[in-house]
Image (cartoon, rainbow, N blue to C red):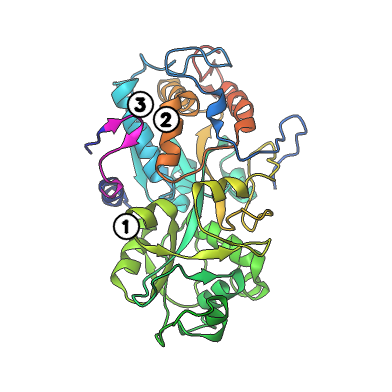
Amino acid sequence: MLRTWKKGTWVLAAAALLSTIALGAAACGGDDDDDAADTPTAAASTSNSTVAGTPTQAGIAANIGKEDSANLTGAGATFPAPIYQAWFDDYNKDVAKNVKVNYQAVGSGGGIQQFTAGTVDFGASDVGMTDAQLQAAPDAQLLPTVLGAVVVTYNVPELKSPLKLDGTTLANIYLGNTKKWNDAAIAALNSGVSLPDKDIQVTYRSDSSGTSGVFTDYLSKVSDEWKTKVGQATAPKWPVGQGGQGNDGVTNVVKQTPYAIGYVELTYAKTNKLSFADMKNKAGKFVTPSVEATSAAAASATLPADYRLSITNADGDAAYPISSFTYLILPKARGKCTQQTPLVDMLWWAYHDKAAQSTITELNYAPLPANLLPKIETTLKSLKCDDGAKNSLKGT
């Protein structure tokens, strides 16, 4: 994939990246630790960042892995795939030319499965692993990377201004209770807008998906009927609709199907010029999905020691209600040092290099809260390799 980097901005359209990701897709209660808990703010994590090559506040240069050499493999979520691919490409181009990463965007379920089976060096998921999944993979360390927004996309040619929806109405659409675009509940939220008398074509993720996990987590919080009949799941039994593989698959179905509705990560909607709805949040405010609104959803969150936390339907006037952390999954101790050290060194760079952090917002994700960085540093320093024989991160 060819990219031109100029002052931290992508010049090449992100559509090429998403196309590359689509081609690469091969398949479809934490511990309490008062010392580790954080209360994030909406500030970007670049406040503690430095340029590569100079020591960070933690005393380790951002480009600590510049002499590393490895071919790394990872698999998992499509939600953060654009930012991960950008990081991996930039790290290889600008820092460690002998570190290459093959990331397969197969969905969060596939990423957890492959990590647990030991067939990849790292996994990725948009939702924290369940207790049962962690029991099956006791060496797993979740590590949040960015925040993202799941947006409600639609293809209604007659609409010239953004659609407004609330959680109850959205749940009823996906339950099959609300079938027409001019239904009274939708009309009540969109006063003065002429809505077509057309059937709603519901679209969902056909693979085991963290994006679906976030979406159904939100629906379960705003609709008792959804919680009872369907619930929160990465691969729920959808009551109605047709499926699409990955964020890119849902994007394509919505683009090609008049009167469709779907849900994808914000980058996919913006890159493909899909319309997306303003959502009514917990405070009763209609919020347009954005980097700022995603950050606002994490502003009142308190992260547990293992980082597993849902921030859907968050408090705050400015909070976008379908927001989420997304995670990488790394070995705590059992990884081979030949693979684990280059991986952890690269992640140290991603969290500390200013250009790497700038890429986050350029691709419509939100940075982690600034006061989470010291905890991330502690986690990276704690990782071992070769069955605990060595520290994974250089300089520790």
Identify whether 253 is placed above or below 125.
below
Can you name the residue that lies furthest to the right here?
A: 34
Q: Quadrant of residue 232?
A: bottom right
Indicate the position of residue 42 as horizontal and vertical percent values: 61, 40
Instruction: Find disc 3 in the rendering and name its residue.
Output: 91
How many C-alpha atoms fall within 10 Å of the one at disc 1: few (<14), some, or many (≥20)? some
Indicate the position of residue 29 as horizontal and vertical percent values: 70, 48
User: Which contiguous range is marked in magenta?
Assistant: 5-15
Residue type at the position of mark 2: Ala
Identify whether 367 is placed above or below 55.
below
Indicate the position of residue 26 as horizontal and vertical percent values: 31, 51
Instruction: Find disc 2 in the rendering and name its residue.
Output: 356
Identify the mark nearer the N-term, 2 or 3.
3
Residues at discs 3 and 1 in contact (Cβ within 8 Å): no
Identify the element where label 2 is drawn: helix
Residue type at the position of mark 1: Asn
Instruction: Find disc 1 in the rendering and name its residue.
Output: 272
Identify the element where label 1 is drawn: loop
Q: Quadrant of the N terminus?
A: top left
Q: Residue visible at 51% across and 77% down?
A: 173
Identify whether 249 is placed above or below 94.
below
Identify whether 135 is placed above or below 159.
above
Q: CA distance from mark 3 to mark 1?
A: 26 Å
Residues at discs 2 and 3 in contact (Cβ within 8 Å): yes
